[in-house]
Amino acid sequence: MERFATLRSVAIPFPQENVDTDAIIRIERCTGTPKEELGRYAFEMARSDPAFVLNQPRYRGAAIMVCGTFFGTGSSREMAVWALAGMGIRCLIAPSFGQIFFGNCLQNGVLAITLSPAQVEALMRRAEEGAPFTVDLENQTINGEVGFGIGARAKRMLLEGLDELGLTLALEPKIAAFQAADRVRRPWIYDFTRS
Amino acid sequence: MAGRTLFDKVWDAHVVEDLGDGVQLLHVDRHLMHELSGVRGQKEIAARGLKMRNPELTLGTFDHVVSTVPGKRGGGNPGAERIIEYFRDASRKAGIALHDFGDDGQGIVHVVGPELGFTLPGVLLVCGDSHTCTHGALGALAWGIGTSELTHVLATQTIVQAKPKTMRARFDGRCAKGVGAKDMILALIGKLGTAGGVGYAVEYAGEAIRALDMEGRLTVCNLSIELGAKVGMVAPDEKTFAYVEGRRYAPAGANWTRALEHWQSLPTEAGAKFDVEHALDCGALAPQVTWGTSPEDVVSVDGVVPDTKPAALEYMALAAGKRIAGTRIDRVFIGSCTNARLPDLRSAAEVVKGHRVAPHVQAWVVPGSARVKREAEAEGLHEVFRAAGFEWRDPGCSMCVGANGELVEPEARCVSTSNRNFAGRQGPRARTHLASPATAAASAIAGEIADARRL
């Protein structure tokens, strides 16, 4: 996975609350559209409105989105993150996120930052003005002033572009040992009639 | 020492390795796959040159893209057919138990898992679908995962997860007649909001939860994700054990005895501390229905539309201050992983019996699984629905998510027993009102949102 480098771009203001993953990418695009083509279908239902924020030239090339409360609620479809990443988004800032969506972001090298509603509100105004943003993961700051929290493990994965599956495959002996002990402890988990 | 919670006991029994920073590697006892998310994972591990580590712990079936047209037994379109064929072929080659068309175990994963005894108390179960929280009703630790995590499970039989905080939601008292599981959980979501459960594993407890049958508990846990929580659980009890015993994949013989002993040790102990506690009085609860575009936009069926969300009201073409009952509707959908089990269909049929669907309403019943369909037909429920003018269809997710092309028309209004009323969820510009099977059935008859207790 691509390493997460310091981002410098305008930020898309997206104040709507409870934006669900159905709205980010329609279910029809999840059934066969190749991953690398999903970007053009992000927020497909809203795009027909010329005033929609993603249709505004000033936000073209943005790598950052400032979002309303509970962004990415709903369905587990990872295509929602693929669609956002496909349109160039590498960082989302919101007061809260849908939890499955939040996990999917990390899996795809997208930094999801949780801040207080007041902090997000201030950044939202800045984004609406079209001011440039800098997101520095190494120092955990936005625009050199707003600090944000992130787990040490998640930070390392993003900065080094690590792949979770690769890391776990290296733990195979631990998995095998767990199962061997567990088979004795809970045999019904492994030993059951199958049709 | 303070007592332990159900959640802590099940979580701790699955830790393979502590990865630090509050993150742990957990063993996955049971993995459910459906064709839509399953295919992406199957392709991904093939592309990486990896194999399934424990195919014997995985079960597959078809639900999302299948047509529910009676007798069709396939995809809703050519793209769906390709997904079905790939999933069938890859699943057979990998050696997972695949419940194909014609098998009792074909249907919505979250209906099929418990029904087959694949879901058990105390297991850690995942599936590439956000409503996997449903399985917590049996005392399983279960949540929905994305494609990357699904691929991780296929290759390693484990999942990496940060341990959530704990919440207990107590449902006190008893529901009145005509009020049930769907109303209970919608009321809680209305009270706490859809982000109320973010970061928590929820345990549902209290007299009203104990009084529910397993299917009702499945309905409650199903909407945990609509509360913002990935995990929702109910402590296993005698009802749970009676439900599981004798099912197709359930432990038998000496394994049953050992499993039962383990399961009886799982419930939360007295004195156990939760990070947060909530309570809801069910005695005063009326049937619930949503008015907006989020499951938290909920009101009693005898209540009025509030003025809190103008954009949602505009989308829904509703006026604030008006009674929600009496709103004219176009469609009724009784189905989905929330409410497509046998007791759901019985409760709808009881309302429908002897009545006719209003002439301007198109009403569907989509059973949750082939087994639900067979058992409902054995009781003659399909005849009750058909005689009233409902379509009686084949099992699948259908109009809850529309992945198979079964959609509500633009600007049409649908009373749906499903779980999401998001803008466009049931089709572009479709207007969804979430409700119980009884409310949906009564609304189909009345041609408008209706209180089943008054029919």
Image: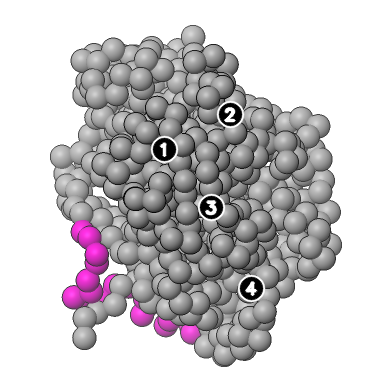
* Residue range corresponding to the magenta coloring: B257-277
| Residue bearing mark 4 | A167
**Classed neighbour count for the residue bearing mark 2: other residues with Cα under 10 Å, few (<14), some (14–19), many (≥20):** some
Instruction: Give the residue at mark 3.
Output: A6
Q: Is residue A87 left or right of residue A34?
A: left
Residues beneath discs 4 and 2 located on the same chain: yes
Given this view, does label 1 or label 2 mark the residue nearer the observer?
2
Q: Amino acid at mark 2?
A: Arg
Please name the residue that numbered disc 2 is placed on. Answer: A60
Q: Earlier in the sequence, mark 4 or mark 3?
A: 3
Q: What residue is at 24 percent from the left and 64 percent from the top?
A: B275
Q: Earlier in the sequence, mark 2 or mark 3?
A: 3
Which label was assigned to residue B392? none
Give x and y (percent) for residue B139. Answer: 41, 66
Q: Nearer the viewer, mark 2 or mark 3?
A: 3
Residue situated in front as seen by the camera: B46 or A157: A157
Q: CA distance from mark 4 to mark 2?
A: 35 Å
Q: Residue at x 39, y 51 (%)?
A: A144
Q: Earlier in the sequence, mark 1 or mark 3?
A: 3
Q: Please tell me which residue lies in front, B311 or A181.
A: B311
Q: Earlier in the sequence, mark 4 or mark 2?
A: 2
From the image, tell me which residue sits under label 1. Answer: A67
Residues marked 4 and 2 touching at CB (< 8 Å) = no
- The span from disc 1 to disc 2 (Cα, nearest Å) is 17 Å
The image shows residue B154, relative to residue A178, as above or below, that is above
Q: How far across and down, in percent of the image, does residue B186 sit?
A: 32, 40
- Give the side of residue B385 with respect to residue B230, left or right: right
Q: Can see residue A150?
A: yes
Q: Position of residue A46 (x, y in %)?
A: 53, 22
